[in-house]
Amino acid sequence: MYKIYDFRCTNGHVFEEMVESNVTTSRCGCVANATRMVSAPSFHLNGADGSFPGAHMKWVKEHEKAGKQ
């Protein structure tokens, strides 16, 4: 299965490439060797559902304020 991974070459260039999950090295456009990086996860905490009380209260206040305008 192919996925998009971030790679960094020995010259410091960072790029994305679609490769199989077992691939850990690649070749950069500058022809340097590159290794797969650990990337930050892509997610957003939703304050509307109440799972995160601080975020939920902020969400409530913002929507109450928007409703009064």
Image (cartoon, rainbow, N blue to C red):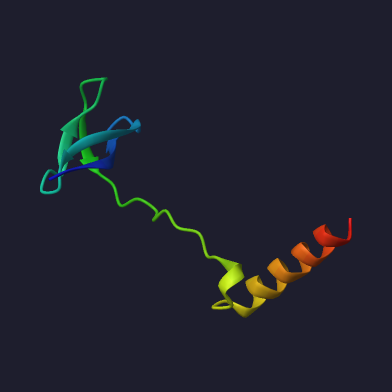
Q: Residue furthest top?
A: 30
Instruction: Spot the residue most to the front.
Output: 67
Residue 10 to residue 69: above or below: above
Q: Position of residue 13 (x, y in %)?
A: 35, 30
Question: Residue at the right extreme?
Answer: 69
Say above or below: 67 vs 10: below
| Spot occupied by residue 41 in the image (x, y as percentages of width and height) | 39, 56
Identify the residue at image location x=26%, y=40%.
Answer: 4
Using the rendered view, name the quadrant where residue 8 is placed. top left
- Residue 44 on image: x %, y %: 50, 59
Q: Is residue 65 left or right of residue 36?
A: right
Q: Residue drawn at (75%, 63%), measured in percent from left and top?
A: 63
Front-most of residues 8 and 1 = 1
Q: Residue 46: which quarter of the image?
A: bottom right
* Residue 68 placement (x, y as % from top left): 88, 61
Residue at image position (27%, 38%) is 7
